[in-house]
Amino acid sequence: MSPETYELLKAIYSYDPGYPLNAQTVGELQHDGVRFEKFAFDSFHDGKVPGLLALPEQAAGPVGVVLLLHGVSGNKRQWLGDDFTHGGEVTKALLNRGIGILALDAQYHGERAINNNFVDPAEMAFVRGWGVRYANMLTQSVVDYRRAIDWLVSRDDINADKVGLLGYSMGGHMAFILGAVEKRIRARAACVVPDIPGLPMAAMNFAQDMADAPLLMMMGKNDPNYTLAQANELYEAVPGDAKTLRLYDSGHSLPVEYAETAANWLSEQL
C-alpha cells in the first residue's frame, strides 16, 4: 500500500469534533456488585450509540478509563460476564486497580442490531459475504469510540490523559485501527487479532502507526483465525520496542489469567 493510499484509508476514520454528541445518561445497571452507568450519544454516521461506563468506587479524583471493544456477534454486556472472553474478570481487574471502563455496542451489535435488520454480523460477513457492509461497520464503530473519548474528556471525574483500550477478536482488530488514528489513547491491548486477508482495513495495514504508544498483543497459539506465523508477523510489523507479545496455549478463548495480566499491564502504562 502506497503512503498516499494509506493516508486516504486513515481519512475514512476522521470526523467533525464539533458535531454535537448529545450525550445523556439513560439509566443504571447493577451487576455483581458493580454499578454501571448506561449512556447514549449521537453517532457521527446517524443513530444512537449505547454504552456502559463503570468507575471505581471511592476514587480520589479523576480516574483513567480503558475502552473495551468486543468481538463479532458480541456486545457491550460481555464485559459484565462472559465465559468465552472472561469479560467480567477484565472489568473487575481494572476497577480493582482504580481504572474505569467504557464499553459500546459496535454497529449492528447488541442494542444496535435493528440497524442490520437483526442479521447477526458474523452471518452477514462470513455466510452472506457482505464484506463491504462489514468494513463500513468497523469504520462507524471506530469513529464512535473516538467520539466516546470526546465525551470522557468533557467529564470532571475522568482523567483524559489516561485513556487506554483493550480489544478482543474483532475488537482486537479495531484496536489497531483506533490505535493508529486516535492519538489520545495511551496504551493498547489487542487480544486474538484475526487475520483478514484482502481487507484494506486489515490490522496489518495499520501496524506502522502503532509505535507512539505501548502495545500488548495477547494471542492463542492454536487460534483458527490466524496462524502463529501470522501473529508474529503482525507483531513484528509494529515499529519500535514499546511492545510485548504474550502467547497462550489456547485457541480463540484465552485462559482466564489473561484478564489479570492485561489489567496489570494497562495500569502500569496509564
Image (tube, rainbow, N blue to C red):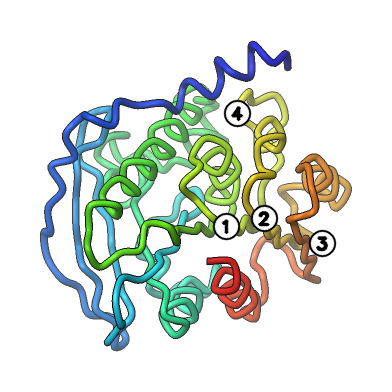
Q: Amino acid at mark 2?
A: Leu
Q: Nearer the viewer, mark 2 or mark 4?
A: 2
Q: Are marks 1 and 2 in contact (CB under 8 Å)?
A: yes
What separation in Å lies between label 4 and label 1 (alpha carbons)?
21 Å
250 or 214: which is nearer to us?
Answer: 214
Task: Measuring from the top left, give residue 47's x and y in whole percent.
Answer: 20, 34
What separation in Å lies between label 1 and label 2 (alpha carbons)?
6 Å
Above/below status of 86 relative to 23: below
Earlier along the polypeptide chain: callout 2 or callout 3? Answer: 2
Q: Secondary structure at mark 1?
A: strand
The residue lying at 38 percent from left, 33 percent from top is 140
Earlier along the polypeptide chain: callout 2 or callout 4? Answer: 4
Please tell me the numbered disc located at residue 187: 1
Q: Amino acid at mark 3?
A: Lys
What is the quadrant of residue 190 in the picture?
A: bottom right
The N terminus lies in quadrant: top right
Q: Nearer the viewer, mark 4 or mark 3?
A: 4
Q: Are marks 2 and 4 in contact (CB under 8 Å)?
A: no
The residue lying at 59 percent from left, 51 percent from top is 172
Q: Secondary structure at mark 3?
A: loop
Above/below status of 145 relative to 44: below
Q: Which residue position holds label 3?
A: 221
